[in-house]
Image (spheres, rainbow, N blue to C red):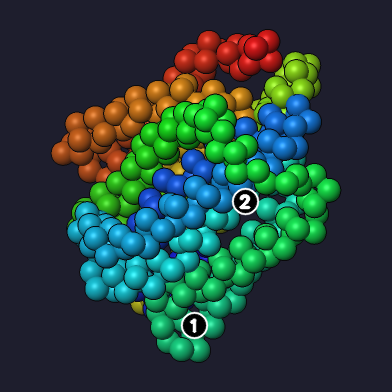
């Protein structure tokens, strides 16, 4: 959605400043949504383990827990939207345009958070087709409504915000209908005592507590990246960093396909006590993860100038030339990063499926500390390159720490022996 939104607004306005304003608004909602993504990750791993064990009473209870927690989180966001919005705008340096975007899109948050919970449950139930269908529907509607609102009603980035609201609520309705159609045979009667069972809830919140800390660190880095880009005081650098990060996010979402598969199958094989299938699954995930990275790098090398020209299609020749010249200085980072980012993205899925969340949390905390230390130490010396170098080292240390904090992945295999 962020990539398409950037393209629509870029061709509508041709302004690096407007693209920067949209980037700030999107970053605020990334912060909100990603900090709620623990619902998806926590739900998928526990559901997959219950599915592997053939416990459909527990899979039904997991769906109910995901919905209850999603509704509670949504209510908190809506109740505190005013202070949340004002704080976010102050931290990000957003102006009135960003504020209008925020208070329009905030009404998409309940649907978005609920979809997190449902996506996690679908993945845990070994179904990747329904999340794919819902995601394609949501994104397609977002493109259609975004184009319509921006061009037919001249609504600018507020039109993009309302496109998110409409598309996400339609997506939630579709996901609910598909649960009723395709899972009624495996659904069991929802018993409140079972849903709120102390032992099950304790495990659910323990897993989610670790994921919350891990996600907060991850979101903090990505959000700070945009905020730091804005504080450089150069519209061209903000536009370049924003677009390059959108390209990296596109790669990460492609890679998430294999991370989600790893979540689903790791949890399933641990629940079924099937060690040989678990090892085979992990080997395949590694191969496909690096294949995805190779595709992304090839695309970046071949088409980065075209992508920038597309996003700034209505800008003046001088402004476009300035942005392209700036992008040429930093394009190397987006080529190198996927090589190192492929594995930690995938391993997050493996750890979530195994509910080995402490290693996820601790590795992310230390990697985040390294990111900020490198950035502030080198910023006076190399400027914007310090931001990219800090991000690259954040990715590398995240991978190294993940690997060794799980005893070189042996802790994952030991989950089957429990």
Q: Which of 353 and 5 is in front in this view?
A: 353
Using residue 113 as the reference point, say whether residue 22 is left or right of it: left
| Of the image marks 2 and 1, the number of the one nearer the N terminus | 2
- Is 168 above or below relative to 153? above
Q: Where is residue 36 in the image (x, y as percent from the top left)?
A: 45, 47
Disc number for residue 118: 2
**Residue at 47% across / 33% down in the picture?**
205
The disc placed on residue 23 is none
Could you tell whether 153 is left or right of 251 in the image?
left
Q: Label 1, on which residue?
A: 149
Please say if the residues under marks 2 and 1 sit with CB atoms less than 8 Å apart. Answer: no
In the figure, 52 relative to 81: above or below? Answer: above
Determine the residue located farthest toward the right in the rendered image. 185
Q: Position of residue 246 (x, y in %)?
A: 47, 54
The spot of residue 73 in percent (x, y) is: 43, 52
Q: Which of marks 2 and 1 is in front?
A: 2
Residue 264 visible in this rendered orientation of the protein: no
SS category of the residue bearing label 1: helix
Foreground of the two, 193 or 307: 193
Q: In this view, does 168 lie to the left or right of 257?
A: left
């Amino acid at each position: 959605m962020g990539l398409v939104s950037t393209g629509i607004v870029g061709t509508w306005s041709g302004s690096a400043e407007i693209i920067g304003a949209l980037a700030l608004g999107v970053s605020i909602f990334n912060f909100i949504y990603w900090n709620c993504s623990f619902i998806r990750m926590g739900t998928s791993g526990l559901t997959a383990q219950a599915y592997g064990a053939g416990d459909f009473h527990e899979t039904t209870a997991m769906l109910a827990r995901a919905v209850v927690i999603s509704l509670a989180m949504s209510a908190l966001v809506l109740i505190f939207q005013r202070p949340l919005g004002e704080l976010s705008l102050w931290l990000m340096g957003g102006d009135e345009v960003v504020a209008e975007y925020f208070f329009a899109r905030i009404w998409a948050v309940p649907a978005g958070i609920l979809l997190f919970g449902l996506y996690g449950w679908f993945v845990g139930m070994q179904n990747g087709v329904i999340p794919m269908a819902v995601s394609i529907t949501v994104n397609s509607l977002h493109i259609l409504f975004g184009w319509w609102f921006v061009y037919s009603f001249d609504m600018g980035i507020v039109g993009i915000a309302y496109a998110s609201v409409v598309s996400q609520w339609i997506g939630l309705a579709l996901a609910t209908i598909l649960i009723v159609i395709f899972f009624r045979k495996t659904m069991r009667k929802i018993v409140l005592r079972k849903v709120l069972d102390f032992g099950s809830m304790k495990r659910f919140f323990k897993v989610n507590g670790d994921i919350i800390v891990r996600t907060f660190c991850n979101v903090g880095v990505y959000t700070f990246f945009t905020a730091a880009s804005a504080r450089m005081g150069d519209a061209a650098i903000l536009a370049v960093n924003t677009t390059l990060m959108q390209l990296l996010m596109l790669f990460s979402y492609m890679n998430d396909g294999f991370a989600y598969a790893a979540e689903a199958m790791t949890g399933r094989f641990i629940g079924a006590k099937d060690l040989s299938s678990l090892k085979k699954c992990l080997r395949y995930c590694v191969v496909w993860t690096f294949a995805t990275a190779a595709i992304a790098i090839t695309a970046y090398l071949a088409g980065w100038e075209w992508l920038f020209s597309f996003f700034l299609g209505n800008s003046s020749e001088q402004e476009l030339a300035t942005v392209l010249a700036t992008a040429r200085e930093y394009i190397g980072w987006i080529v190198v990063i996927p090589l190192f980012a492929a594995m930690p993205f995938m391993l997050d899925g493996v750890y979530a499926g195994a509910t080995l969340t402490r290693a996820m949390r601790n590795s992310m905390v230390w990697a985040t500390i390294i990111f900020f230390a490198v950035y502030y130490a080198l910023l006076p010396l190399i400027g914007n390159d310090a931001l990219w170098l800090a991000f690259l080292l954040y990715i590398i240390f995240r991978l190294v720490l993940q690997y060794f904090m799980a005893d070189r992945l042996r802790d994952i295999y030991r989950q089957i022996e429990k």
